[in-house]
Each structure stands twice: as structure tokens, then as C-alpha cells.
Image: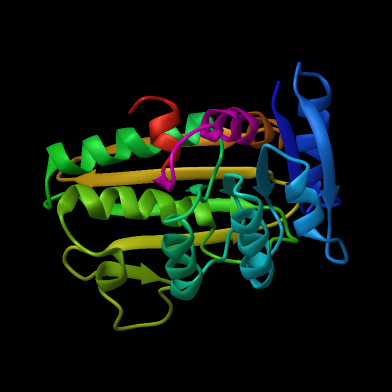
Amino acid sequence: MVRFGVIGSEGAMGRALRAVIDTSDDEYAGGVDRAGDPATLAAGADVLIDFSAPDALARNLAAAQAAKVPLLVGTTGLDRSHHDALRQGAQEIAILQTGNTSLGVTLLAHLVREAARRLGPDWDIEILEMHHRRKVDAPSGTALLLGEAAAEARGIALADHRDSGRDGAGVPRAAGAIGFAALRGGTVVGEHSVILAGEQERLVLSHVAEDRAIFARGAVRAARWLVGRPAGRYTIDEVLGL
């Protein structure tokens, strides 16, 4: 039995995580939100799952380190300073950070990596995503995860080849660019398509999320996998043995 502590427990993902844990053989050790104390939560948990906000990461990471418990971070919108902090923290505890905890998306990223590597640079890559009207970051963390998979396969840095928000005249497609387009509206949970366009043919790899429960189930499985691992930085690919 694993005791799960949830940070960001009052959010949509936090509630979905509670529902999944409550129907398992594991234990919900508790949850905290903005005003809560992650240190107290960490002391009574075997693993922490963080779906809060980027500005809360430092406090949550410190709590996990102090309690010597692993940490799964599903928060999106992280910048370089956050990733630097996670790399430092991984010297003391097991950490898994991902832009998407869906196991289907994890496999999609693997397929994107394979397609980009095998088809080569002559195929243009465009990533299209759509989410509900309340989402505040764009492109989504999942879209960036897919872009990173494509860039890694080509041996390039996504930051140097990312192309977002084309508008107006005089904006031809740059050679080797990885394009992003973000759509927002309604109550869409999440849709992502990676388009690889070659001469007279296209390959489209897609994933549609119909309910947040898929992310909660993936996060719980990944967090359970993380328990007992030595200190280090892990990926959700490793949860599936990819």
C-alpha cells in the first residue's frame, strides 16, 4: 500500500487524483492547496504528487527533500529555473517531472520520436493542440513535450527551432522549424496532433483526452512506480519501459 500526498488538491486534477486513489488499494494521505503546508503532508506520505502552480514548486520541492520522499511534478508552465531546481533536488530524492501524465500521450511521444528520426529533416513538423477556454499557458505542456520528442530525434534544440504564432505577411516557414498552433474554447480536455508533412503525403499522429481521469490514473501509476527508487531524475517513459 502506498500513501499518496496531493499538492493542489482542490484543483480539477487534485480532485481527479483523490477519486482514483480512493478506488484503489492505496491510501490518500491528504492534500494541500495554496494555504496548506506541504511539509506536514510530506511527513505522512510515501510519495507526493504536485499539480499546483510554478510559483509553488520551490516550497513543494523543499518539503519533499526534507521528508526524503519522492516527488512527481505534473505542473505545467515551468521555466528553466524550475528545471534547474528539479535537477538539484534529484541529487537527494527521486523526481519525475512531465508535461503530461497520460500513458497514451507517453506512447504518442515515443511514436513521434521514432517518426521524426526515421522520416528525416525533409518532413516538416507542425503541432496542433486544443484545450478548454480557461487554460492559461500556451503552447500546452503536452505540445512542448511532443516538440521536445521531435527535436531530440533530430538532434536539435527545440528552443532554436520553435515557431509559434505565425501571423501576417512575410512569415514563410523556416527550414527545420517545429511549428506550434494553440486553440482554446469550450470544455475541451485536451487534443494534440503532430503533423509530419512530406512531399505529396502527410502522417498525422493524434491523441484525444476525453476525461481528466486518464491523467490521474497515469499520475498514480507513475508515482507508485517512483516509490523506492534511488535519488535521480526519471521520465514517464521509464514507467512504460520505453
Q: Give the image quarter of residue 88.
A: bottom left
The location of residue 17, given as percent across then percent down, is 76, 36
Q: Give the image quarter of residue 30.
A: top right
Q: Is residue 85 left or right of residue 68?
A: left
Residue at the top extreme?
25
Indicate yes or no whether the magenta region holds residue 132.
no
Q: Residue at x 43, y 39 (%)?
A: 230
Q: Which residues are magenta?
A: 218-234
Colouring used for the render: rainbow
Q: Give the image quarter of residue 116.
A: top left
Q: Is residue 169 left or right of residue 236?
A: left
Residue 40 can be seen in this image: yes
Which image quarter is the C terminus in? top left
Q: Residue at x 11, y 46 (%)?
A: 120
The location of residue 77, given as percent across then percent down, is 57, 65
Which image quarter is the N terminus in? top right
Residue 13 can be seen in this image: no
Q: Is residue 73 left or right of residue 53?
A: left
